Amino acid sequence: MQKLSIAIHGGAGTILKEDMTPELEAAYLKGLNDSLSAAYAVLEEGGTAINAVKAAIVILEDNLMFNAGRGSVFTKKGVQEMDAAIMSGKDLSAGAVAAVRNVRNPIELAAEVMQNSNHVFLSGKGANDFAIKQGIKLEPDEFFFSQFRYDQWKAIRDSDNYSLDHTHQGLEELFKDKKFGTVGAVACDKDGNIAAATSTGGMTNKKYGRIGDSPLIGCGTYANNKTCAISCTGHGEPFIRAVAAHDVSCLMEYKGMSLQDAMHEVVNIKLIKMEGEGGMIGVDAAGNIAMVLNSAGMYRGMRNSDGDNYVRIYQD
C-alpha cells in the first residue's frame, strides 16, 4: 500500500534552545503542527500531493511567526516583497512568483501560474496583475505589519546591512544571530505522486529586487517522481550556485543514492564547502522522508501513514 507522507519546514539557522522562551517554542510547535494537520488531512481524503503542500504552506503563510506571506519581513523600502514556488513531480509542471506585493498567499499565486498560465515564473507588477486577473486574494499593507518585524527593520534601515532572518534576541545581536526565514513542504500522495512548495519574505532590508533560492526551480524547490521532492531553507545565494534541490535529484538518478544519502551529500558536504548554511526536507515516491540540516536548528515536522508524527526545532 502506498505510504502517505508530508514534511514541512519553517526556516533554519542559529536557532538555540537557550534563546527560546517556553511560550515562543510552544507557538512555533503549534504553527508547525497546524500546518501538518491541514496537509495530512488533504492526503487522508485522497487529495493530491500538490494540494497537500499548498495547504501546508497557506497555514504557515498566515502565521506571523514565519517569514512568508503575512509574516514577511520589510525590504529596504519598508514594504514586503514575497517569493514562492510549487512543483509537481508527476509531470514536472511548476509555477513560481517573485517580488509580489499584497498577495495574502503567494503559494496560491504560484499554483495559478503552474495550472492556469503558459509560463513558469512571473515577477513584480506582472505577477501582481496576474493575481488580480485570477482572483487571488490581496490584502492592504497593514495586514502584513507586525511590530517585531518593523522594529527589526527600523534597527538597520539606515544602513546597507541586511538580515537573513528574524532574531528573538536583542536587536544589537541581529547580525550575530543567523536564521533563514522560509517555509516549505513536500508530500507523497496515494498515487505515489510527489510535490514540493516553498515560500518566503526574503531578507530584512533587502534591496535592488534581491531574489533568493526559494522561487527558483531546481535551487530551492524541485520535484520529480523518478527521484524526490525537495524544499530548501538557508542562505539563498549558495543554494542557487549549488542548484541544491536539483543536485539531490541528480545524485539519486545518476548515482543511485538514497534520498537520505543524497541530501547529506549536498547539505553537509557540498554546501558546507560553499559556506552555505541551512537545510532541506525531502520525500521520494515511496513516501520516505528525510530532513537534513547543517545549522544549529530548523523548524520542521513530518507525518505519515505508518504512524510517524513529530515536530522539531533544534539539531539532534
Image: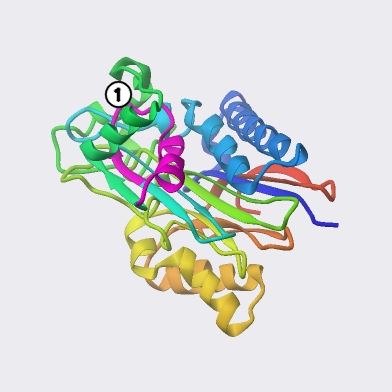
Question: Is residue 208 placed above or below 145 in the rendered structure?
Answer: below
Front residue of 151 and 83:
83
User: Mark 1 highlights which residue?
Assistant: 150
Q: Look at 37% across and 46% down and name the residue there.
A: 117
To which quarter of the image does residue 125 belong?
Answer: top left
Would you say residue 25 sits in the magenta stretch? no
Query: Does residue 197 appear left or right of residue 176 in this picture?
Result: right
Question: Is residue 112 placed above or below 79 in the rendered structure?
Answer: below
Front residue of 217 and 17:
217
Question: Is residue 75 placed above or below 104 in the rendered structure?
Answer: below
* Residue lying furthest bottom: 255
Element at badge 1? Answer: helix
The answer to whether one can see residue 181 in this image is no
Q: Look at 25% across and 43% down and name the residue there.
A: 162
Query: Does residue 231 appear left or right of residue 288 in this picture?
Result: left
Which residues lie in the magenta part? 97-118
Residue 115, x across and y down, in percent: 46, 45
Would you say residue 116 sits in the magenta stretch? yes
Q: How many marks?
A: 1
To which quarter of the image does residue 124 belong?
Answer: top left
**Hey, what amino acid is under mark 1?**
Tyr
The answer to whether one can see residue 291 in this image is yes
Front residue of 96 and 300:
96
Q: Look at 31% across and 26% down and name the residue there.
A: 102
